Amino acid sequence: MSDQNRQILLRRRPQGLLAPDDVELVTSPMPELHEGEALARNLYLGMEAAMRNWLTGSEGGYMEPVAIGDVVKGSSVSEIVETRCDAYEVGDIVTSLGNWQDYVVCQDDILTTKVARDVEPQRYLSLYSSAGVTAFLGMELGAPNEGDTVLVSAAAGGTGSIAGQIARIMGAGRVVGIAGSDEKCTAAVEQFGFDSCINYKAGDLKAQLKDHCPKRVDVYFDNVGGDILDVVLGGIAPRARVVLCGAIASYLEGKLPGPRNYTNLMSREATMTGFITFNHWDRFEEIFGRLRGWADDGRIRVREAVFDGLERCPDALNSIFTGGNIGKAMVKL
Amino acid sequence: MSDQNRQILLRRRPQGLLAPDDVELVTSPMPELHEGEALARNLYLGMEAAMRNWLTGSEGGYMEPVAIGDVVKGSSVSEIVETRCDAYEVGDIVTSLGNWQDYVVCQDDILTTKVARDVEPQRYLSLYSSAGVTAFLGMELGAPNEGDTVLVSAAAGGTGSIAGQIARIMGAGRVVGIAGSDEKCTAAVEQFGFDSCINYKAGDLKAQLKDHCPKRVDVYFDNVGGDILDVVLGGIAPRARVVLCGAIASYLEGKLPGPRNYTNLMSREATMTGFITFNHWDRFEEIFGRLRGWADDGRIRVREAVFDGLERCPDALNSIFTGGNIGKAMVKL
């Protein structure tokens, strides 16, 4: 085992995408374990849009911002390699807040969860992860009725691709995606079972929305906010449910204009609701169980966009915003 | 009885407030009654913000726009003065779509409802009216819990003044208003029982909101939209309910920017819902009964802002937007 721990530290607050000089890859000595601690080697690091917010240092999030000089924060699936903690044995697989580094010190606390070894470890960052829970909770709130039209933004992404499949399982009549390239639209339809998918970069979104959702939108799973949310609000059906699961559009550019078409919430007697996945810790176990059932039955297919090596972390995080991948972005160490 | 019917016709679509030349007061011959019709003399004409929208000719409302040359549309409480319809006797009081004129022809249809004579007729435009139903439905959706802080915009207006009192009846812990003058704030507190009222013209709304709602806002009854909605979204409590009952701010100026703080619906896990009062015709009877009970018990106090004479209709309608009155605006003929 190495006696060095490579880490990526935040050097300055990024403007827009993460720039090379915003972070620095350093080599630190391996941490020493105290009683009650275990050392875990990070196998995969998960990339989530919210992480970008933690770098900005803005208030009001559910996680403390990353301080300048600290290791960049992020989720991980990791293997215990040394232990002074009764909760973990060497060889255990855990999900944790492993951060952008090779090794992390874990304790027996809420941040670290021992997981089953009969699942490929990367699945703990894609399906059995905050992405999977977000997809589930969003669809639970949207509650598609039999036959409803469900629209999902970022449909080829780690969350949207699962949300669309859950909508189908819940009985939606028509599941339509929105994505940013023809390749992603093809993946949404062919791999994730969407009925159709709108490439919002390929033409007027309003007109495409009418084509793809001729009976308007009953449930909108919103991952992105911004202009897309506004256009979709223009096309909601009576008693529609708009579920706000993220606002990627605002993470890089700061607060965007609000959706002018919010007034349709009145004329269509519709509802817009939001939630924070991490407020629902107490349900993760139950939800993972359901997702596992659907995955085992072949009703949910998952795809991961794997970047290779710690030094690719900035690229992997940026890819969420530039829309480079299909499936859940992660880094393999 | 006169053999003339004075009417106010729409001559051109207004820009902003209704200007003198937008309408014309004409004298028409009294309509002739056919079998199944009754003639009613309008006693009071109700003024509602939505009427202004019907003059603009914009699509998407729940009522056909008023055509150029037609009588301006609006609600009325009227007395039957001549009848060839079995449903009505001379002397009956009805609520109807009487429009801006002295006399209206009624039929036995959904537009006209015979009402009890033991209530002052103007109450059928203030409390037992769409304003009262809007206040009720809005609070039903907002569903204040015991002890909640409920905030009501246009608190001295025909709808807001009732909404605040219903919030109190439903168990709200703190009922706070927003209004546009000290006089209206005083009325909200002294006549309508609000705990306090913010004069949004008297200083920074955000700071005042913090003062008046130290535990943030659990339920917001939104009558106005625009900047006020945006600021309030900045101050909502976890699991808040924002109920959209109107967007006066947008009726005159067209579509306004959306509320940038809608993202707080996510971080506070809150809900924003809207409704159209007239979609709930089937519940009017039930709701009027409840309002009557509360009014009879002295738990709801109502105030009317009465303008005198048909020619005052434009002023009365404009007063809703310039914020000139306390209570429900109406014209006495």
Image (cartoon, coloured by chain):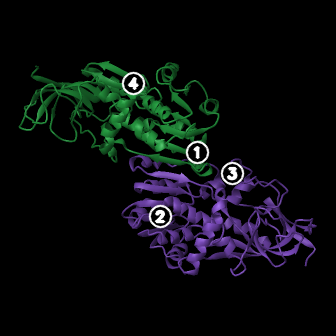
Chain colours: A purple, B green
Q: Would residue B325 appear left or right of B36 to someone viewing this image?
A: right
Q: Write down the chain letter for disc 2.
A: A
Under mark 3, the amino acid is Gly
**On residue A151, which mark appears?**
2
What is the C-alpha distance between the residues marked 2 and 3? 26 Å
The local crowd at label 2, few if under 14, some if 14 to 19, many if 20 or more residues have their Cα within 10 Å, is many
Viewer-side label of 4, 2: 4
The local crowd at label 1, few if under 14, some if 14 to 19, many if 20 or more residues have their Cα within 10 Å, is many
Please tell me in which quadrant of the rendered image residue B290 appears: top left
Under mark 4, the amino acid is Val
**Mark 1 residue element:** helix
> In the image, what residue occupies the spot 41% across and 32% down?
B159
Same chain? Circles 2 and 1:
no
Under mark 2, the amino acid is Leu
Q: Would residue B56 appear left or right of A266 to someone viewing this image?
A: left
> In the image, what residue occupies the spot 52% across and 40% down?
B144
Q: Write down the chain letter for disc 1.
A: B
Q: Which residue is mark 4?
A: B302
Q: Which residue is mark 1?
A: B261
Same chain? Circles 4 and 2:
no
Residue A171 visible somewhere in the drawing: yes
**On residue A61, which mark appears?**
3
Specify which label sits upstream in the sequence, 2 or 3.
3
